[in-house]
Amino acid sequence: MLSICQHGYESFLERELAENGLPVAEKGPGWALTGDEGAWPAEKFEALAFSHVTLLAPREFKGEAVNAIAQQLADFFLESLRGERIDAAWPCVFQVVPEVVGLGRRSSGVEKAFLELLKKKLSRIAKLATPDLPRGAGKVRGLFVFFADFGRVFAARDLWLGGQRRMADDDAAPSRSYLKVEEGYIVLGREPQAGETVVDLGAAPGGWSYSAAKRGAKVIAIDNGPLKGGALDHPLIEHRLEDAFGFRPPNGERYDWLFCDLVEDPNHVVQNIVQPWLENAWCRQFVINLKFGHVDSLALLRELRAASSPFGRYAKNLRIRHLYHDREEFTLVGETIA
């Protein structure tokens, strides 16, 4: 299988795959190729943090000319369609490593030529093709093409999505971290709703609080620092000048969401915030960001997934991801058991 990650984190992905019994045979900018995943269960794919997209049983194609590569892809796709019926929109996605200059233009040229060939053979199916990955996580069927280089392409009909994707910015958002929580909603599969309640620990300058409030949720933003941009004086955001580690819900009150994005040691955050919040079910859903810049990222993953951890004991539907908008950090989403 071919796993795609954020550029610069290939070594992290390689270690993670190896720990899961899939040694990497080859890697390049933003990707790693392993052997056959065989009968890997869904929970194995769900557990991958660094893999954004995984092409299952990919075929490799090589060629110097745009039309030559397009023809190979068309032959592969048409052959794989035997016995299959497509009656609804299906993803036809061409992806590259953005850091490789000019590769995007090559991909666009091949995509255009491929679709022209498909129209000549199967016009109805060509019209149903959509160029975007579906939102959310899980297995998807379509056609997925990844350019490892100008003359080297991998293609697969089946794909496993981690849920990560690039998000659109908002001019009113007070910080780049706004993009992380927006992406976190997609990984979780739901987002704050009008009338729901949110506690945002370590809120300043308010990107996560603004994200929830723009959807109509009522937010308590906990931070001794100032709020800015769209979070400042927002009618649905109550800013409390308190320490995030000391805040506790009054009288056993329960919130719909816990947000937490602190520049602190991850073990300190887990012990002093995650543990009490999940154990007491003070929230129903959570989006939590943990920094791994000064710890071993794979060791941290093992600790977070352990049955004895607060997430193992008190959470369900946990997903740990290295997001498109994350740096040296993990974003964790899920629900409390109670």
Image (cartoon, rainbow, N blue to C red):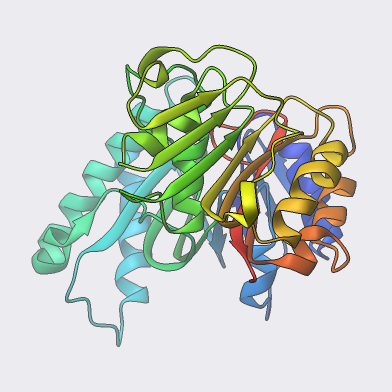
Percent x, y for residue 15? 83, 48
Tell me the residue at 36%/61% (across/down).
Answer: 143
Percent x, y for residue 160? 52, 63
- 94 or 62: nearer the eye? 94
Tell me the residue at 68%/57% (across/down).
Answer: 48
Quadrant (top left/top right/bottom left/bottom right) for the N terminus:
bottom right
Q: Is residue 178 visible?
A: no
- 127 or 155: nearer the eye? 127
Tell me the residue at 65%/71% (across/down).
Answer: 337
- In the image, residue 124 sits, relative to residue 245, either above or below, namely below
- 96 or 64: nearer the eye? 96
Q: Is residue 253 visible?
A: yes
- In the image, residue 4 sits, relative to residue 203, either above or below, namely below
Percent x, y for residue 138? 49, 66
Horizontal relation, residue 246 to residue 45: left or right: right
Quadrant (top left/top right/bottom left/bottom right) for the C terminus:
bottom right
Residue occupying the far front of the picture: 251
Horizontal relation, residue 293 to residue 133: left or right: right
Residue occupying the far bottom of the picture: 83
Q: Where, by quadrant of the figure, is residue 288 drawn?
A: top right
